[in-house]
Image (cartoon, helix red, strand yellow):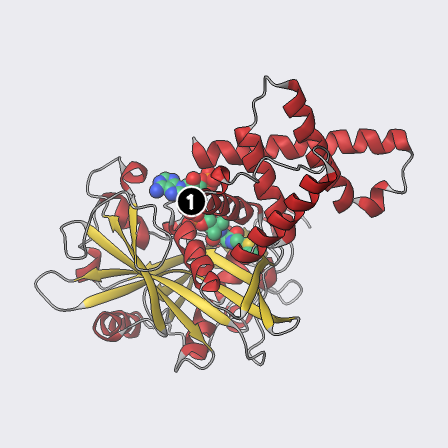
Amino acid sequence: MSEDLGEWLSDSNEVLNLQLVRDPEDEELLQYEDKQAIEPFNPAFTYPIFGEHEKIFGYKGLDIQLKFASGSLRQYLSINYDAKLNSTATPSDEIEGTLYKFIPPDYTKSDLDFKRQVEKDAETFKPLGEKINSYIRKSQLSKGKGKAKSKAQVKGKGVSDGIEDLKEGDEGAVVFEMYKATWDTPGFREYHRRMQLFILLFIEGGSYVQEDEDSWEFITLYEKRKRPESEIYTYHFVGYVSVYPFWCYPDQVRLRLSQFVILPPYQHQGHGSKLYSTLFADMLSRKEVAELTVEDPAEAFEDLRDRNDLRFLIKQNILDDPMFQIGLSTCGDEKQRIQRIEWENTIKKKYKIAQRQFDRLLEMLLLRELNQLNEDKVKQYRLHVKARLFRFNYEMLSQMTPEERKEALAKTYESVVEDYERILEMTFH
Ligand SMILES: CC(=O)SCCNC(=O)CCNC(=O)[C@H](O)C(C)(C)COP(=O)(O)OP(=O)(O)OC[C@H]1O[C@@H](n2cnc3c(N)ncnc32)[C@H](O)[C@@H]1OP(=O)(O)O
């Protein structure tokens, strides 16, 4: 492309500006870091919409504003630019028509209509489905201390990291609520069509789910605010998770977590952990669920899952179980090894954790407890992990010479342990 035409190229991740909008009266309630909730943010990916190069051709000074009413997620689109290329040989990309294929057709381009929608949201929008959990955060009232102050307490059946003793209605208490929905929840299909865009924009390799597959389940997460001196509660979308049940012999289901997103203004505040642990508690309470698996997890999500699963197992006092250190696959007598396999299978089944994830979690906990000065124990641990890695990578390793195999296993072991150390450090620092 000639240099001149290059001037007409925009990076679609940079020019697509997203924003969650609430009524000005509700925006005023936000102080300091809490204001982040209403700041514009950019997508991480736009290749599913604008093509693999994530470029839009034919404009200078392009600014695409896609705003969402923060509760109902009704959308507003405004496309602005300083100049548009007027050439039949190299026509400008069609922006609205391209976006149109990915968003529901009920978006507005009118500022007034959108303002009215946002006002209406405040009065009428309520999350769809059944409320299954809530927790309370301290509002970011003091400038510059955002992260340190966002501590939480879970109410109800969820997993609590209960630090603050705030109650709903206390000054500075912000409530977050989670709702479970399916396609049968009235209005949810339509709502889902508005929120699914976030999957394309934030999950690499993400795609829309099939609406004709009946069994999808969703948990949505909202910030809930009370308007002072009124009985009005407003709800603001934070993120959601979708899961799909697969039949599991003979009469249970395996739940597969498919999509998980916390919107950027709410990331790194522990909301992802709350949503995940609520899903986990929900599936543990359901007799028909045998196991929770995860479809193609992104690295950041794997970390989140590891951290939460580790904390969960520790809360179940697994470290105090006499079997925890006994019968590792390369030591002890045959009887102990069989006992250990039985013990592992019982715990795995009880907590409905998938095999590989469960193996990894136990290995991380064993590493945490390992006395690095005890050479025998270190060797025992190494052989235990390598035996699992050998089983897991059997097909590939069995085609190598013994020397190559030894080297490959040693390398994999090193990187696995390095990763375990990183995860343990961020979970228990
Ligand atoms: C199967 C799939 O769908 S995989 C796809 C997963 N989704 C995506 O990748 C979409 C885009 N990303 C996201 O939606 C989110 O970033 C997620 C889901 C990956 C993580 O959600 P978050 O709400 O940010 O997670 P959470 O806040 O619990 O933990 C993330 C980080 O915040 C830190 N953190 C958690 N709580 C706090 C707190 N109160 N104060 C400060 N930091 C905190 C954690 O230590 C963690 O740090 P790290 O990122 O350096 O490891």
x%, y% of residue 358?
59, 48
Report the quarter where the C terminus lies.
Answer: top left
Which residue in the protein does label 1 denote? 315
- The residue depicted at 46 percent of the width and 68 percent of the height is 218
Q: Which is more toward the observer, 43 or 338?
A: 338
Q: Is 260 drawn above or below residue 410 in the view shown?
A: below
- Would residue 250 appear left or right of 190 to someone viewing this image? right
- The residue depicted at 48 percent of the width and 38 percent of the height is 320
Amino acid marked by disc 1: Lys
Can see residue 179?
yes
x%, y% of residue 57?
58, 58
x%, y% of residue 263?
42, 55
Q: In which quarter of the image is residue 66?
A: bottom left
- Would residue 171 appear left or right of 47 to someone viewing this image? left
- Would residue 345 appear left or right of 14 to someone viewing this image? right
x%, y% of residue 107?
40, 74
- The residue depicted at 28 percent of the width and 39 percent of the height is 146
Q: Is 180 drawn above or below residue 418 in the view shown?
A: below
